[in-house]
Image (spheres, rainbow, N blue to C red):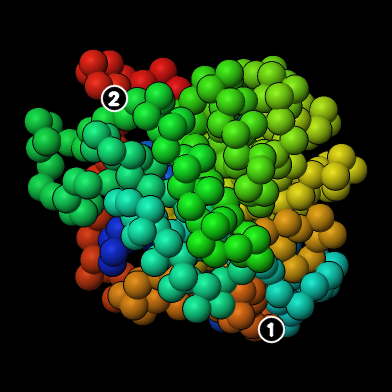
């Protein structure tokens, strides 16, 4: 008797932050898969899309037909794409690949063609309120084994620079329209003066062996980004991340004309078409899509294949606001493609690991996954149910004059 999908369960849990988890159950009670459909700040929108619209489409279908189901869900809405629907699709896609690996008795990377490397080079995040704090943080990460590190510093006079804030660290509170979302103040001019000095300080203090990265987080205009990239060239960054907003692809030509510094972009993309001109025109060097927001492993493989022909490497998004299933999926793809570049990572707190065991492991600068069938992740459903959803928002960035930044 053919295997069929019998149930799609959506679980929203908040052990350390909100996660949207998708469980696909099959007619064989021992065969199921878990996926991640977390969209930070809009979790319930994704959960509703899954429960009310997508789940009913999957019942009774063959879980082996991943590509066919992917296309049906993607095209079936007619109004395609967008972060909510593509994140929901990613949750389904990851769960289906998890099932396929379990049925085959193989890790997902093996189904994708097998290993091309022994481990995936990883980078972590280091930040501080001043240069000395950043340096101390980088030295601690180097002692832990990291060979590549993203560096951010608080700009004097600003309430927040991406990656570091001088505001309270509380992420969740009771819902209060007057208090939420958190507001950060940012101005490009002081930022542009500080960042080159930070990287210069770190290069003098730490030497050239450690790879340094910096994330602008789309907070500059194209000409400002070109200026920053040009001033940073002497310090040989591994890459400069998200220098400008993603909407106008032609703006990247202006940056490319002024600098040879490697550029990484893509965490706000939702499909391969968002990044296609940047890849085919070689306007970026690293594609940074989030597997949890582009439809999962199925779309990531296609993006990587396109990028390989244009000397663009992957650097999949790996922040703390996606679940271990997506981090595991990142590494399964990393291990199986030829044009892997680097992998962003985080260490999950103990409570999150208890709810969602199986995150990739880190050793001596590299990430890896086990040879367990599927993605190698699971969920303690009973424990997850004890951590209910808590409303939370991402910060809003405003300029000193009170206007919302146009980045």
Residue 63, percent across and down? 67, 61
Q: Read off the residue under disc 1.
A: 371
| Residue 19 relative to residue 206: left or right | left
State which quarter of the image contains the C terminus.
top left
Residue 405, percent across and down? 36, 21
Q: Is residue 369 above or below residue 205?
A: below
Dot 2 falls on a residue whose secondary structure is: strand
Residue 137 lies in what quarter of the image? bottom left
- The residue located at (75%, 30%) in the rendering is 283
Disc 2 residue crowd, few under 14, some 14–19, many 20+, Cα 10 Å: some
Numbered label attached to residue 398? 2
- The residue located at (56%, 71%) in the rendering is 146
**Who is closer to the viewer here, 180 or 69?**
180
- The residue located at (42%, 62%) in the rendering is 135
Residue 301, percent across and down? 76, 52
State which quarter of the image contains the N terminus.
bottom right
Asked if residue 7 can be seen in this view, the reply is: no
CA separation in Å, label 2 and label 1: 46 Å
């Amino acid at each position: 008797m053919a295997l069929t999908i019998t149930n799609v369960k959506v679980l929203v849990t908040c052990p350390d932050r909100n996660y949207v988890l998708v469980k696909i159950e099959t007619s064989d009670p021992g065969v199921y898969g878990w996926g991640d459909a977390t969209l930070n700040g809009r979790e319930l929108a994704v959960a509703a899309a899954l429960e009310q619209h997508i789940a009913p489409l999957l019942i009774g279908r063959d879980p082996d037909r991943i590509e066919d189901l992917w296309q049906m869900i993607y095209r079936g809405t007619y109004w395609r794409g967008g972060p909510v629907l593509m994140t929901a699709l990613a949750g389904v896609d990851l769960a289906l690949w998890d099932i396929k690996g379990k049925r085959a008795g193989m890790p997902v990377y093996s189904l994708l063609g097998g290993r091309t490397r022994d481990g995936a080079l990883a980078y972590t995040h280091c930040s501080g309120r001043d240069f000395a704090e950043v340096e101390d943080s980088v030295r601690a990460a180097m002692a832990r084994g990291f060979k590549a590190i993203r560096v951010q510093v608080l700009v004097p006079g600003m309430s927040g620079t991406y990656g570091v804030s001088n505001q309270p660290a509380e992420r969740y509170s009771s819902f209060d329209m007057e208090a939420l979302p958190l507001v950060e103040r940012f101005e490009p001019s002081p930022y542009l003066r500080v960042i080159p000095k930070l990287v210069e300080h770190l290069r003098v203090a730490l030497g050239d062996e450690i790879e340094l990265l910096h994330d602008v987080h789309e907070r500059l205009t194209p000409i400002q980004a070109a200026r920053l990239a040009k001033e940073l060239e002497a310090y040989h960054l591994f890459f400069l991340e998200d220098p400008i907003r993603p909407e106008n692809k032609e703006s990247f030509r202006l940056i490319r004309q002024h600098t040879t510094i490697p550029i990484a972009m893509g965490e706000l993309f939702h499909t391969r078409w968002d990044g296609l001109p940047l890849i085919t025109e070689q306007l970026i060097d690293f594609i940074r899509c989030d597997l949890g927001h582009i439809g999962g492993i199925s779309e990531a493989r296609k993006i990587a294949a396109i990028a390989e022909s244009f000397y663009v490497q992957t650097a999949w998004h790996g922040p703390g606001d996606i679940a271990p299933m997506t981090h595991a999926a990142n590494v399964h793809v990393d291990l199986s493609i030829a044009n892997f570049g680097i992998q962003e990572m985080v260490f999950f707190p103990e409570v999150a690991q208890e709810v969602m065991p199986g995150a990739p492991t880190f050793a001596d600068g590299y990430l890896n996954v086990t040879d367990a069938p599927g993605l190698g992740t699971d969920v303690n459903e009973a424990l997850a149910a004890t951590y209910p959803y808590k409303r939370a928002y991402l910060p809003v960035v405003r300029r000193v004059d009170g206007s919302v930044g146009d980045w």
